[in-house]
Structures are given as C-alpha cells and as structure tokens.
Image (cartoon, grey):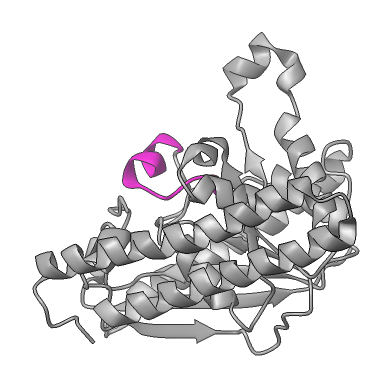
C-alpha cells in the first residue's frame, strides 16, 4: 500500500512500527511467563499459557499486516492443503534470512499450531525476543565446538539433552517444532567455509532432528519439509523488507510421513544413522533443486544474482 514511497521514508516508518509490534506483544508474553512461574496449579499455568500464545499469534498477524503495508509483496504458498492446527508437526527448513522467523510464524496462522523455534543461546539476552521465547518454552541451544568438547568431554551431547528436556514440554498441547537444520543462516562466506556440496544451502545437521523424532516421533502427525525462497531479493532480505522492496515470498511445503525410516537410535545404531543421514541429505538435494528451478523461472529477473551471493 505504501510501497510507492521512497525507500528511506519507508524505513523511517517501518522500523519503529515493527519494533513497537515486537515490544508490545513481547512484553505481554514475558509477563505471562513471569506469572506462570508464580502460579502453583498446572491448570492455572495452562490458562496463562493460552494468553501468551494468543499474544504470539497477534505478533505474527501484525507482522504480516506491516509487511503488506510497506511492501507490494506476493505470497506463493504450495502444499499446505492437508495441514491442521490440531496436529503435532516437526518442521524443517532452510535458513536464508532473519525474516524467516516472522515468515514461518505468519504461515502457521490458522494452518498449524504456533511454532516453537530452536534458538541460539545468544538470543536469550535480546530484549523481548529472548524473554518472550523463554515464556513460550522455546528451547535455547548452546553449540559446542569440537575443540571445546575435546577440552571438556562432559559437554558431549549437552545440546541433545536440551532438546530432550524441551520436547517433553510440547506434549501437553498441539505444537509445531521448527528446526533450521543448517544450524545458521546461509551466507556466501559460510557456504565456502563449510565446503557445501549444494548451490543454495549449507549442509544439514542430522543429530538434533533425529533425537527430536526419537523422543516425540509417536506424537508427530507429520514432518513438514519447508523450502523458503525470496526470488527477487537476493541480498539482505530483511533490509529489503524494511525498505519496502520485498517482492515475493515462496513457501513450498512437503508433508512427509513419520515412519520407521526416520525414527530410531541415531547415536547407537550405525546402520540407522547412515540411513537417516541419507534420507536428510536427499531432502536437501531435492530442496536445492527446487530453489534452482524457482530462480531459473522466466519471471525471476534477478536469478543471476542469487547463486551463492546472498548475505542476508
């Protein structure tokens, strides 16, 4: 609606409004978290939790309204017809930009339960984001380097134990657990550093989602393999959105069965570990090809810029 305005003016308008949206709803969710700590009765805590999730939904809803207010954006969503907000899902996705989190949160509205993200430990201290995520029982993952583990072997498997403890909390009500299995946002520098075999993706990390499936596999109704693509905004997608220059968001969803192929003892069974890695790697091969096909489409005028050049 306001995309015709000069980009600097849009930035001056959009940035405060997105910040205000995060502050208001983040504060409400945080207060709900504090109240839950003080309540002795589980039933009372559940009622407060419903208020927190109501605020979370409104943050997602207003994010979308603000995105559409400042951007002439086209949403292309494929494969979501069989989804239900009353089911449990494990959602795996590529990670292109900080915008991925608001995009997946608004995608969830009226389709699937409110998503719970696996977050980096550092985000715990970000105002409103960290406190609201804590109040919503989202897990914070602290990654340890091989050097740290060699120095202190007790750190081995700590992040997996965090996954197990967090997943137990999600049994109480329908939940979508989201895992960016690349472990970090895609950039050209990371792509080179990791010597990725893919054109548009970083290598997928299998351990976290394998453990989640082993812990909660019987509860999940499906695995959602989501591919996020911003075909017309090859660089700094979040900045492009704040400037009113976000053109198109493509969300492709594959609904996959939860079966014996992906549920097993990943850490003790070598045969299953290799099988699971092959399954996940094939998903990433298919995802890479989907992204390439989308960028090669005739209406993608900026496709030549995206081949491993994004830093958003």
247 left or right, relative to 250 = left
Task: Identify which residue is drawn at 30% across, 50% down.
Answer: 311
- Front-most of residues 33 and 183: 33
Q: Is residue 306 visible?
A: no
Q: Position of residue 63 (x, y in %)?
A: 42, 72
Q: Is residue 189 magenta?
A: yes
Q: Position of residue 75 (x, y in %)?
A: 41, 83
Span shown in magenta: 180-194
296 left or right, relative to 221 = left
133 left or right, relative to 11 = right
**Quadrant of the rendered image containing residue 11:** bottom left
- Front-most of residues 206 and 217: 217
**Quadrant of the rendered image containing residue 113:** bottom right
Task: Identify which residue is drawn at 33% across, 40% down.
Answer: 189
Task: Identify which residue is drawn at 54% across, 69% down.
Answer: 105
Q: Position of residue 161 (x, y in %)?
A: 79, 36
- Front-most of residues 74 and 256: 74
Task: Identify which residue is drawn at 32% across, 60% down.
Answer: 238
Q: Is residue 250 magenta?
A: no
Q: Is residue 162 visible?
A: yes
């Amino acid at each position: 609606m306001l995309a015709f305005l000069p980009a600097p003016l849009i930035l001056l308008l959009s940035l405060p409004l997105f910040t205000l949206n995060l502050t208001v709803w983040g504060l409400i969710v945080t207060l709900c978290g504090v109240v839950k700590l003080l309540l002795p009765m589980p039933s009372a805590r559940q009622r407060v939790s419903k208020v927190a999730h109501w605020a979370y939904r409104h943050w997602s809803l207003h994010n979308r309204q603000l995105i559409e207010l400042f951007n002439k954006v086209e949403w292309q969503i494929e494969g979501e017809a069989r989804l239900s907000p009353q089911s449990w899902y494990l959602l795996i996705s590529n990670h292109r930009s900080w915008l991925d989190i608001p995009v997946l949160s608004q995608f969830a509205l009226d389709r699937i339960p409110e998503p719970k993200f696996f977050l980096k430990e550092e985000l715990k201290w970000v105002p409103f984001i960290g406190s609201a995520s804590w109040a919503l029982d989202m897990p914070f993952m602290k990654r340890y380097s091989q050097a740290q583990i060699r120095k202190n072997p007790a750190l081995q498997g700590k992040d997996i134990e965090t996954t197990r403890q967090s997943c137990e909390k999600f049994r109480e009500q329908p939940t979508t657990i989201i895992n960016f299995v690349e472990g970090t946002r895609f950039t050209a520098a990371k792509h080179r550093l990791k010597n990725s075999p893919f054109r548009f993706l970083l290598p997928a990390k299998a351990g976290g989602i394998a453990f989640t499936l082993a812990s909660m596999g019987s509860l999940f109704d499906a695995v959602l393999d989501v591919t996020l693509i911003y075909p017309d905004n090859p660089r700094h997608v979040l900045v492009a959105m704040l400037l009113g220059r976000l053109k198109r968001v493509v969300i492709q969803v594959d609904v996959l069965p939860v079966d014996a192929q992906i549920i097993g003892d990943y850490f003790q069974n070598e045969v299953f570990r290799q099988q699971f890695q092959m399954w996940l790697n094939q998903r990433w091969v298919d995802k890479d090809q989907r992204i390439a096909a989308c960028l090669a489409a005739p209406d993608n005028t900026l496709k030549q810029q995206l081949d491993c050049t994004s830093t958003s």
